[in-house]
Amino acid sequence: MSSFDVVGVGLNATDTLILLPRFPAYGGKAPFEREVLSPGGQVASAMVTCARLGMRAKYIGTLGDDQRGAVQLASLRASGVNLDDIEVRPDCPNQSAYILVDQVTGERTVFWKRDDSLRIDPASLTPDKITCARLLHIDGHDTAAVARAAEIARQHQIPVTVDVDTIYPGFDRVLPNVDYLIASSEFPARWTLESDPLRALAMIQDEYGMRLAAMTLGADGALGRFDGEYIYSPGFVVECVDTTGAGDVFHGAFCYAVFQSMPLREALEFSNAMAALNCTALGARGYIASVEEARAFARSAARRSNAEFEQHP
């Protein structure tokens, strides 16, 4: 029996949120209202989401030994995520981000930095660290390491989900071992050089053979291609406070949906609901809802649909 339901390999970050009454024009100058130190990061926040949803979650990554690393470590410990294989790097700053939040819209602009000494060593990812779980979730930043993790998972018939937002050199080594790709809205076109998102998803799925090739669409929801057919799941209307971390929570919720064997349409709807609810509070992990809260919200909330994708039910 597996010790964990899901293991995540990838990034964490400690954010400084800078709250702006409104975003200034380029070259402008504006006061900010306050700043907030907040833990985040793609895979780390996804694992916190999984734990909140009742999964036995484990996180594998690296931390700096500064204050930001301590903030991240405390948050992960408090969430119940297993940290047996996390590495704290001495004399190294943790990955950090400065996030400008426009309080009119809740949209954010991110500036981030990660020291090269935080890179995950692929050799450290021994099979036992991956095969202890029933599902693997990765991002793309430390490409060689996540490629190694995905390869081990494939060898042991462990499903792999991936969150990728940009082009990483060598990522073509990762994709053949991915079962569920959910990328940013920009990734499919940039990867394939095909501007039509439907054709771009089809090209990726046909080349690499993953079960699902999908992309998140921000407030408009998510679009995926599964078994050769497109499924569009509209987003939900909320009073948006901060969009930071919405995608990370989406991916954590999707891991839960895969673990629960949800039908794909239900899985995307559930993940959209979790992401939307997180936007109603400040920070990457501002409001990670329970399963019951997300389902109740999905039943009653208004949808925000994109007509471009509605024609592909």
Image (cartoon, helix red, strand yellow):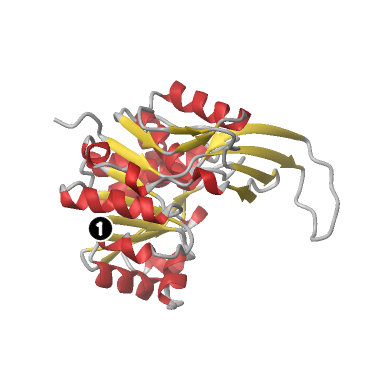
Name which residue lies at 30% across and 52% down: 148
Closest to the observer: 103 or 57?
A: 57
Residue 214 placed where, x, y %?
Answer: 35, 60
Residue 160 placed where, x, y %?
Answer: 27, 50
Q: Which residue is mark 1?
A: 177
Q: Residue 6 vs residue 33: left or right?
A: left
Q: Is residue 205 above or below residue 305?
A: below
For the residue marked with disc 1, what is the amino acid?
Asn
Closest to the observer: 233 or 182?
A: 182
Name which residue lies at 42% across and 78% down: 194
Q: Can residue 162 be seen from the camera position used here?
A: no
The N terminus appears in which quarter of the rendering?
top left
Q: Residue 35 vs residue 110: left or right?
A: right
Q: Quadrant of residue 56?
A: top left
Q: Is residue 214 above or below residue 118?
A: below
Q: Quadrant of residue 228?
A: bottom left
Residue at the extreme bottom: 194
Closest to the observer: 243 or 35?
A: 35
